[in-house]
Amino acid sequence: MSDTTIITIDGPAGAGKSTIARLLATQLNYQFLDTGAIYRCVALKALSSQTDLSDEAAVAQAALSAVIRFAPGEGVQHVTLDGTDVTSVIRTPEVSQTASIVSALPSVRAALLQMQRDIGNRGCTVVEGRDTGTVVFPNAGVKIFLDASPEERARRRHLELQGRGTAQSLEQIAQEMRERDSRDSQREVAPLAAAADAVTVMTDGLSIEQVVEQIKAIWSSRNEVAAE
């Protein structure tokens, strides 16, 4: 698919991808695919079953056997894993860190790639993740790399966790983000990187609405070009 029916939004943790992608999908009447939630579900399954994270085959089997479903909700996308609602639990710091570890495993990424493509190809889709524009949907017509300064990303994640009642210091969050950025950008398979044809949008100092409007303007201009 090489037109604007697929919009990919990649970027590091704390850049605002999920919030922006969800709102953008709502305003454009697109479906929303949070690929990070898929890896978080695999991480949670591995943690719950006490799977050895260094056993790539075992983690990949957990990925293949996971039944993951998405359902729209008021202001949030509900996620179920093997029939259980895990919308909140997959956002905990422990699951976040584990998701970064399991997502670096080539067999896990291979196991989940077709699942992501199958969901995205069901219709017009805003896809959010770390390799959606480089690997999952390389022919997407609109590719965004959403970023912010490390300090701003840590501040946002701190506020997000506070809102969920999770006590974690700003310094600890900043350190975990640095570790995750390093793992995500240095992994051998599908590292975090802006696609060559992606537009980078820095979100420091911008409201959610301003960022969404920037992306909608890019989407609109690509639609005009496609119609010519």
Image (cartoon, helix red, strand yellow):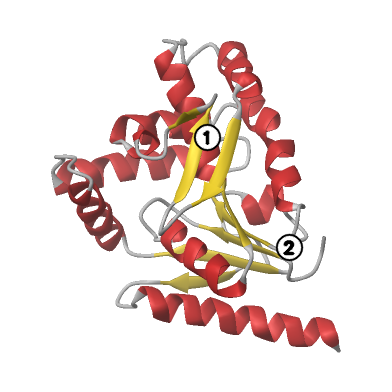
Dot 1 surroundings within 10 Å: few (below 14), some, or many (20 or more)? many
Residue 166 falls in which quadrant of the image?
top left
Q: Quadrant of the N terminus?
A: bottom right
Looking at the picture, does residue 212 appear above or below residue 97?
below
Relative image position of residue 222 (x, y in whole percent)? 72, 81
Asked if residue 166 lies left or right of residue 130, the reply is left
Q: Quadrant of the C terminus?
A: bottom right
Q: Residue at x 54, y 68 (%)?
A: 26
Residue 209 falls in which quadrant of the image?
bottom left
Q: What label sits on residue 61 in the rendered view?
A: none
Residue to which mark 2 is pinned: 140
Relative image position of residue 40 (x, y in whole percent)? 47, 34
* Disc 1 secondary structure class: helix
Dot 2 surroundings within 10 Å: few (below 14), some, or many (20 or more)? many
Counting residues from the start of the chain, the first of labels 1 and 2 encountered is: 1
Looking at the picture, does residue 214 appear above or below residue 158?
below
Looking at the picture, does residue 67 appear above or below residue 200?
above
Q: Residue furthest right?
A: 228
Relative image position of residue 143 (x, y in whole percent)? 64, 66
Residue to which mark 1 is pinned: 39
What amino acid is found at the position of numbered circle 1 in the picture? Tyr
Q: Residue at x 60, y 73 (%)?
A: 28
* Disc 2 secondary structure class: loop
The foreground one among 70 and 178 is 70
Asked if residue 140 lies left or right of residue 61, the reply is right
What amino acid is found at the position of numbered circle 2 in the picture? Ala
The Cα atoms of the two marked residues, 1 and 2, are separated by 21 Å
